[in-house]
Image (cartoon, rainbow, N blue to C red):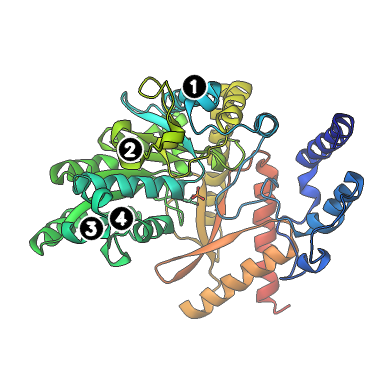
Amino acid sequence: MNSEDFRRHGYEVIDWIADYLDHADRYPVMSPSKPGDIKALIPDSAPEDGEPMDTILEDFRRDILPGVTHWNHPRFFAYFPANNSGPSILGEMLSAGLGVNAMLWQTSPAATELEEKVMDWLGELISLPEGFHGVIQDTASTTTLCALVCAREKSTSFAVNAAGPAGLAGAGPLRIYTSREAHSSVLKGAKIAGFGAENVVTVDIDENRAMDPLDLEARITADLGDGLIPCCIVATVGTTGCTAIDSLSAIGPVAKKHGLWLHVGAALAGTAAILPEMRWILDGVEHADSLVLNPHKWLLTNFDCSAYFVRDPEHLERTLSIRPEYLKTGRDGEVNNYMDWGIPLGRRFRALKLWFVLRSYGARRLREIIAGHIALAQEFAGWIDGADEWERLAPVPVNTVCFRWKPEGMDEAALNAANAELVDRVNAEGTIYLTHTKLDDVFAIRLAVGQRATKREHVVAAWEVLKRMAGGIKAGS
Ligand code: PLP
């Protein structure tokens, strides 16, 4: 592609994205595609000769778009959000244009130094105490894996790194403590890092579905009595099911007392801490060794952008750094080489899009947007609370409401089935998109408010669709 064609198609693509951002609500939120629909439209082999970009873009619109679920649709209430925004997209484009690999300071000093600065900005926005250092990674799952490996090396004095599985075997069973509401990435990380699934200890939860610190202490004490090796606590600020907030003020002293690593998973809810009135969710974070929050979830920044903060970067580097001759530079020791702060060698220039977002919106506007989402979720929770035949199933500390339709005369099994059918019907209709979880054995519908373009009218629409669809099920239609 020559630069003239690039320019022409580039303008065309930007125009398309600008229209899309304004009118994503023209599409059904969840793709109506059935398995195999899209594959059937794509040839079995790559073309031998290049094709015109006009044709490729036309195929994108005709064949690919129907298979897209519109995460930035204002009526997307499923899972947790994956935000984007104009400034973020522009930053992402420049990053793609530069095509930088930010593995070493030397491979793009600006990428490293901007990353240091925007992570400091972000830490300040959420009022992290002094002494945390940040690095941008791809996902929260990766950062949790890093935290588990760091915890493993701390409690074995680097024996596992040195001796491999023999080191792990010599150390004895290393135990990880997390609540049963914790994200699946904790278990996945434990498996990858060699702890073993059975060494992930499930701590009880309290009436707010947050980790019970007394049960945590009891389980650590019991493990010590059994000759097992407590290693790491993973607390969650904003659980994926219902955004329960584990108390870092209560968990932190337990970690300190037993000398355990404390990792805080705040992938979604950490963003809420930019609001002074929500900063309480991170009270006690001074006890943490590491923390993750995802600007790609709720801070208007395109996937992927996961902010990982650590207390002791030297420990992180010592755990992960491998320096073959071909990666040595004359500046080592003087600068951050972020390849040593995470798992992959190659790294994208992600700081650019976060920088664009933080500068373009400014802290005040970001606070307004996040506060607006939280207020809408609270209002929706009030509608559920005030309605006959609907039940809220968990507190709503942040932006996610767990609830169910509860018509009279149904037992628990029938209620679960009716609510599953309700979610299916709602999503098939395409006006809104919702997903579910199970709280204990209860099927819970989740409504998470967090899209850049979501306004009150969209949440009102969600409530109307839910009531209409529930009415249809009741009427047997
Ligand atoms: N931790 C929590 C609490 C989450 O809610 C999620 C995703 O929803 C994750 C981790 C995983 O995030 P990622 O996709 O960035 O790995």
User: Relative to residue 171, is residue 260 depicted above or below?
Assistant: above
Marks 2 & 4, CB-CB < 8 Å contact: no
| Left or right of 394 on screen, residue 229 | left
Mark 4: which secondary structure?
strand
Which callout, 3 or 2, points at the residue further toward the start of the chain? 3
User: Relative to residue 54, is residue 107 depicted above or below?
Assistant: above
Q: Which amino acid does label 2 sit on?
A: Leu
Residue assigned mark 4: 178
Residue 474 in view, yes or no: yes
Residue assigned mark 1: 113
Q: Position of residue 421 (x, y in %)?
A: 62, 73
What distance separates the C-alpha of mark 1 from that of mark 4?
34 Å
Q: In the rendered view of the protein, which quadrant contains the C terminus?
A: bottom right
Residue assigned mark 3: 168
| Left or right of 414 on screen, residue 466 | right
Residue assigned mark 2: 316
